Image: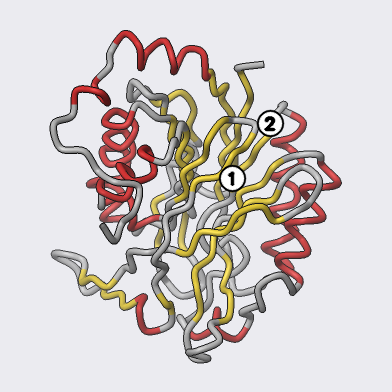
Amino acid sequence: MTTSVAAVIQMTSSPDVEANLATARGLLERARAQGAVLAALPENFAIMGRNEADKVEVAEVAGEGPIQAFLGHCARELGMWIVGGTIPIRDQEEPGRVAAASLVFDERGRNVARYDKIHLFDVDIPGREERYRESATVVPGVQPMVTTTPLGRLGMAVCYDVRFPELFRVLQAQGAEVFSLPSAFTAPTGRAHWELLLRARAVENLCYVLAPAQSGTHDNGRETYGDSMIVDPWGHVVARVVEAGPGLAVAEIDRTLQQELRGRFPALSHRKFQVTSDLTS
C-alpha cells in the first residue's frame, strides 16, 4: 500500500501535564477514527510552562516517566504510530538543562526513534519586546534522525530547525520522504514566515511536511501561531487546522505520486552542490 493517512494535531498546552495529556489523548483518538496510521503532536505538547524552568522540573529520564509511558500506551492501544512532539529529557551532564526530544513510537508502543532539537530559539523578535533564550534550559542536539514509518522514511526536525535548509538537505540525503516538524511558532514570526518556510522545505526536497503546532495564548502570556498543516512535495497545503486552539488535520501521504513527481521533475538529481549525510562533514 503506497497511500497512508497522516494527522497533525494542534494544541494550546498549559503548565498542567495531566490536562495536556488528556487533551492529546482525545485528539489522537479522533485522528485514529479518521484513519490515521501516524499522528504528530506539537512541540511542548505535554507542558507549556509559566517559565522555562517548569520543563526542567518535569523532565524525564530517557525511557522512563509518565509522558513517555503515555505515548507508548496511546500508540499501542490505538494501533497507531505517534510522533511525540517534544518532551523534556534530562541531560546527565547538565542537570539544569534538558534535551528537547522528539520521540517516535510505533503501533506496538515501542520507542523506535529519538531526535533532539538542534537549532535553539535564542532571538529577540523584531519590532516587539519579546525575547527568547531557549539555550538557557535546553541542550542542543547534534545528530540528524531519519526513521522508517508506514508513511515512508521520516526525517525529524523541530520548530526553529525549519529556518536551516541544510538540515533538511541532510535528512533528504539520508532518504527522507516525509518531514515531521512539531512546532510552537510565535505569533509574529508565524504570520511572517510559517507557511512560507514549510512550503519551501517541501518543494526544495520534494518531500511531504507534517507540521503540528501550538496555537493560542498560553498561561505565560506567550501567543503561538497555530495553522498546523500538511504540505505535499509540490508545495500544496493539502490539509490545515483553520481555527485557533486545539484541533487536527488529516491527509493522505501518497508515495507513488511522490515517486512519480521525483521522476518527472528530477531536481534532486540536478543539484551541483551535494551534501553528505553527516552534518559534521
* SS at circle 2: strand
Against 124, residue 178 (above or below) is above
- Give the residue displayed 63% in from the left and 26% down from the top: 5
Q: Position of residue 114 (x, y in %)?
A: 57, 59
Q: Name the amino acid type tagged 2.
A: Ala
Disc assigned to residue 36 = 2
- On the image, numbered disc 1 is attached to which residue? 40
Marks 1 and 2 sit apart, C-alpha to C-alpha, by: 10 Å
Against 29, residue 43 (above or below) is below
- Give the residue displayed 29% in from the left and 28% down from the top: 203
Against 133, residue 218 (above or below) is above
Q: Position of residue 82 (x, y in %)?
A: 66, 46
For the N terminus, the image quarter is top right
Q: Position of residue 227 (x, y in %)?
A: 43, 42
* SS at circle 1: strand
Q: Position of residue 11 (x, y in %)?
A: 57, 53
Disc assigned to residue 268 = none
- Give the residue displayed 46% in from the left and 23% down from the top: 238
Residue 230 or 61: which is nearer the viewer? 61
Report the side of 28 relative to 194 (left or right). right
Residue 81 or 225: which is nearer the viewer? 81
Q: Are marks 1 and 2 in contact (CB under 8 Å)?
A: no
- Category of crowding for the residue at label 2, using alpha-carbon neighbours closer than 10 angstroms: few (below 14), some (14–19), many (at least 20): many
For the C terminus, the image quarter is bottom left
